[in-house]
Amino acid sequence: MVENIRLISAQVVEEVLKYDELIPVIESALGKFSNRPQSGVIQPLRTCLRIPAVDGFLGVMPAYSESDGVLSTKLLTFFPHNSGGLSTHSALTVLFHCQTGVPTAILDADVITAYRTAAASAVATKHLVSGSPKKLAILGAGVQARSHFYALSHLYNFYEVTIWNHRPEKAKALAAELGNHVTSVDDAEKAVRDADVIVTATNSSTPVLKAAWVKSGAHVNAVGSCRPDWHEIDPLLMQTAAVYADSKEAALKESGDVIKAGATIVAEIGELVLGKVQPRNSETTVFKSLGIAIEDAVAASLVLSKLDAHTASTQ
């Protein structure tokens, strides 16, 4: 059995995944998730094994979509105190044959996680932002900051992009990598001032984005601070903005931004996709992204489909 399992590296995943294909796939998956079980999607909450000695955890994220013909589980670890250039996050996605349960592929999921998270934020922004946003602000300068720049830039032509990070040298390096219209700033308030779209992608345990800094009608994609005891968003902003999530159930259990503020979740993004609710895009909005297993499942399936199509075209 093992010798027949395909192993897909991060390099191959990055070569294959493109936002013009991934964003619609994630949009469809979010809609199906919010219409389960009628849609054929089955997905429990993420299971986490806490590892107190290193303040980390091992997570397990299974999902099944009948219409997509995909059965998978994602295994991920978060070890926040890793040093020496070692990533704090590691992940693998395993795909199984839907009829036999036989494992068919193991994919490096670090790139998948970065891309599908940014694609979900792009879907949320598409449904919650009216018109053409001009300024993008990113708080954070890691993998998610980079992927969000590319995913959101796929949808919009931003005239100004500002990046802040608690380590200014990382913000400067990312800004230099991304291009001439991207600048780094040393002050988070200055970064988000007058921004139409804001991304928070930090591992902060305390708020890095204050409500007073956010202009009325702006949209925030909050993708960091992935523990129930951490929060990167000012509770006042979470209490006064229209808050959306990928999964209401997960947000109420896992998101410190939601839990600490006692925030009310208006709807899931999938409900917007399906037209079940109308977007309150005249208000300030927040998309709290936890990352859900069906996103990993359909993204991994897309990678394999594209690899198979390439193989078939060269034979």
Image (cartoon, rainbow, N blue to C red):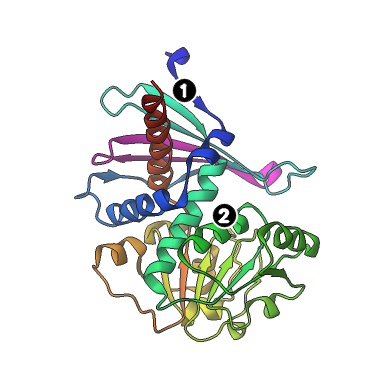
Secondary-structure class at tag 2: helix
| Count of numbered tags | 2
Residue 170: in sight, yes or no?
Answer: yes
Q: Which residues are magenta?
A: 48-76
Q: Classify 177 as above or below 104.
A: below
User: Which picture quadrant has residue 85?
Assistant: top right
Quadrant of the frame with the N terminus: top left
Which sits earlier in the primary sequence, circle 2 or circle 1? 1
Label 2, label 1: how far apart the Cα atoms are: 26 Å
Name the foreground residue: 310 vs 71. Answer: 310
Secondary-structure class at tag 1: strand
Name the foreground residue: 123 vs 97. Answer: 123
Q: Position of residue 10 (x, y in %)?
A: 57, 36
Outermost residue on the left side: it is: 38
- 104 vs 203, left or right, is left
Q: Residue at x 45, y 62 (%)?
A: 122
Q: Label 1: how many residues lie within 10 Å, few (<14), some (14-19) or many (20+)? A: some
Q: Residue at x 37, y 46 (%)?
A: 294
> Are circles 2 and 1 on residues that touch, CB within 8 Å?
no
The tag on residue 6 is 1
Name the foreground residue: 92 vs 129. Answer: 129
Q: Label 2: how many residues lie within 10 Å, few (<14), some (14-19) or many (20+)? A: many
Say which residue label 2 marks.
147
What's the residue type where badge 2 is placed? Ser
What's the residue type where badge 1 is placed? Arg
